[in-house]
């Protein structure tokens, strides 16, 4: 079975700091990768996704992620965070071998201090 | 319309009650999902329906009973729940489910926050 690791469980940053959240997965075949965000009291929203092509993908709200196949990683980045980015961030992976079953990482809680 | 709707938003029920959660999508998606999410934890898959048939049941206790009346609707019937079942219940949909559909992202509803007393 797939596994997805998010090593940063809780990150605290000041506004304008740069952000990088790690995501590593275990499957060696073709994968599809997602980052979802969940603001306090709200539902999961898709930030960005990677299916194929350019490994650097840009999402909403200034977020981007880079797929590095050799490292089995899909790290999320933002050059300058805002207080409104305070939320839970989940990485998710699917693969052809598992159909459309999502494997979620354990999540990273981001707190941005004004 | 890229929306998945869920009702009710909040539900409080006793351990002897019977209630149902409802989910609806009008995107023509043929796969629908139920997830359970505890605070600050990732969603845990409960059930998958593909073309209105149950395709995955992740060893969920029988006090949770899913139903897919048609391709747009998904219900979750609740009976004799325990306090530890209190959680956010999320519905999601995707175009299809299965090997050919691995590229299809899931669209999540806002969830029903369930409290069992």
Image (cartoon, rainbow, N blue to C red):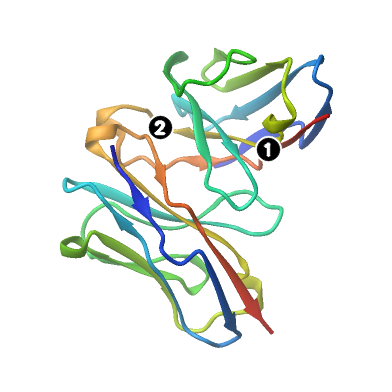
Q: Nearer the viewer, residue B14 or B69?
A: B14
Considering the image in quadrants, where does the N terminus of chain A appear?
Answer: top left
Q: Position of residue B91 (x, y in %)?
A: 58, 33
Residue A81, above or below A70: below
Residue B108, above or below B57: below
* Chain of the residue that carries numbered disc 1 in the rendered image: B
Picture disc at residue B68: none
Q: Nearer the viewer, residue B94 or A107?
A: A107
Relative placement, left or right, of A16 versus A95 is: right
Q: Residues within 10 Å of mark 1 (few under 14, many from 20)?
A: some
How many marks on residues?
A: 2
* Chain of the residue that carries numbered disc 2 in the rendered image: B
Residue at x 51% of width, y 19% of height: B71
Q: Nearer the viewer, residue B82 or A92?
A: B82
Which mark lies nearer to you, 2 or 1? 1
Q: Secondary structure at mark 1?
A: strand
Q: Secondary structure at mark 2?
A: loop
Residue at x 70% of width, y 24% of height: B21
Picture disc at residue B87: 1
Q: Position of residue B22 (x, y in %)?
A: 68, 24
Q: Residues within 10 Å of mark 2 (few under 14, many from 20)?
A: some
Considering the image in quadrants, where does the C terminus of chain A appear?
Answer: bottom right
Q: Which residue is mark 2?
A: B95
The image quarter containing residue A21 is: bottom left
Q: Nearer the viewer, residue A61 or B26?
A: A61
Relative placement, left or right, of B27 versus B116 is: left
Q: Position of residue B107 (x, y in %)?
A: 51, 41
Q: Position of residue B70 (x, y in %)?
A: 55, 14
Residue at x 38% of width, y 67% of height: A22
């Amino acid at each position: 079975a797939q596994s997805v690791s998010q090593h940063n469980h809780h990150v605290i940053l000041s506004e304008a700091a740069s952000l990088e959240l790690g995501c590593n997965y275990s499957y060696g075949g073709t994968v599809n990768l997602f980052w979802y965000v969940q603001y306090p009291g709200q539902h999961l929203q898709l930030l960005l996704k990677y299916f194929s092509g350019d490994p650097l993908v840009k999402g909403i709200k200034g977020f981007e992620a880079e797929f590095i196949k050799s490292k089995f990683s899909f790290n999320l980045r933002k050059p300058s965070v805002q207080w409104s980015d305070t939320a839970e961030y989940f990485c998710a992976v699917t693969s052809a071998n598992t159909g459309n079953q999502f494997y979620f990482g354990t999540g990273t809680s981001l707190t941005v201090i004004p | 319309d890229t929306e998945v709707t869920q009702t009710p938003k909040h539900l409080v029920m006793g351990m002897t009650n019977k209630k149902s959660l409802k989910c609806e999508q009008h995107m023509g998606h043929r796969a629908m999902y139920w997830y359970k999410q505890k605070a600050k934890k990732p969603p845990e898959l409960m059930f998958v329906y593909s073309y209105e048939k149950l395709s995955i049941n992740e060893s969920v206790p029988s006090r949770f009973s899913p139903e897919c009346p048609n391709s747009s609707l998904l219900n979750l019937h609740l009976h004799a729940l325990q306090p530890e079942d209190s959680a956010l219940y999320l519905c999601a949909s995707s175009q299809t489910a299965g090997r050919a559909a691995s590229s299809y992202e899931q669209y999540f509803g806002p969830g029903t926050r369930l409290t069992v007393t």
